[in-house]
Image (tube, rainbow, N blue to C red):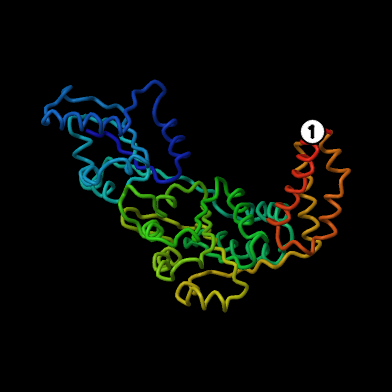
Amino acid sequence: MNSRIYIFIGSKKDFEKFLDAKIPQGDEITYFMDLIKDYNANLRQQHAYLHGTIEVKNLIVHADDYASVFEHVIQNFVSIVTTNHDVDTTFLHNPPKRVIEALQASYADKIKYEYTKYRDVDRKVLRELWKKISEDIVGQQKAKKSVISNLFRLCNSSYQKPVVLLFLGDSGVGKTETAKVISQVLGGNLLRVQFSMMQTIEGYNYVFGSEHSKSSLAKDLLSRESNVVLIDEFDKVNPNFYNAFYQMFDEGTYIDTNYKVDLSRCIIICTSNFMSEADVIKCMGMPIFSRLDDTIMFEYLSIEDKKTILDNIYNAYIENFSKEEKETIRSSNIYQWHSDNLHRFKNVRIIKHRVEKAINDLLVDKFISGS
């Protein structure tokens, strides 16, 4: 049984690529949930084997499969898989700790670990990142330089801890967009966790882990596509939540009830609307504050910055309208009015909403009137 066992730790996208590379085209594939159906059918027949021993060439266990079965399946994973099945090669994606421990106990010499290979940070990557955030993030020169300075430590290959940054400043001034650009340059979608949603017992269970069938931060971290994690509104939870992050920030290891996650050289970005470190310490406490590598302030946008943002939003929004509609928009005073009143708008989000609403209202009025 089990000539080879591959345990893949990483994103779903990379796991699928790994399967494509390892399983020859035309090879028979059995999915874990189909195997479980067969196992349950045997139980209903008082353990009588319905088909004798079934040969399984390639058994695939997806990360979501573990949440779809009862607890006893996780506890007895090896025996359930091997009952009435002779498996040649097993592929497991992000299995819980108990499954890994059971496999190690019985088949340690047959297990091979594979991982998502995250793009590493070196000087070439930092130059690429500097170019990209300079193009995509308006203003915030001091903040952008601080980001590059903090990530420069990753150019040292011996540095294995995560880089943990807290972005401070008002909403809509570029904090989240900066995190998105970093993730984009490093490859893969950004893993974004909204801490403002963690006000209930479900939020507590998400962070610390509970039943294996529930969603959890550890599961999401294991499946991240890039080595960049954004925790939005990090201050919007009970300070007791921060206990879960001490080891993660210090050593790059995150452990909950069911999973253990390696976050070596990960870039962890937390955001807050606080405007000073003193406010951060008062709200969040010194134990978690002292584990941050740096706090980076994103300043209020200047009128010049808002003007650039207005131009970008206006031009991008009208791009996909018809020629006639573009002429209608440009002949109106929408752009000029917003340009003259930029002092009224606090951030990018408000400018975007107001400009788009004004354009939509104009075109709808014309559409309804039939002109």
Q: Which image quadrant for residue 152?
A: bottom right
Left or right, residue 293 beside residue 27: right
Left or right, residue 347 beside residue 50: right
The residue where tag 1 is placed is 322
Q: Is residue 59 above or below residue 195?
A: above
Left or right, residue 98 beside residue 209: left
Q: Is residue 136 above or below residue 89?
A: below
- Foreground pick, 369 / 53: 369
The image position of residue 332, as x and y in percent, is 86, 46
Q: Which image quadrant for residue 341?
A: bottom right
The image position of residue 336, as x and y in percent, is 86, 53
The image position of residue 244, as x and y in percent, is 39, 65
Report the residue at 85% width, 39% height from top: 328
Report the residue at 51% width, 69% height from top: 292
The image position of residue 350, as x and y in percent, is 70, 57
In the image, what residue type sits under mark 1?
Ser
Q: Is residue 297 above or below residue 230?
A: below
- Foreground pick, 52 / 105: 52
Left or right, residue 46 beside residue 135: left
Quick one: quadrant of the N terminus? top left
Report the residue at 38% width, 42% height from top: 8
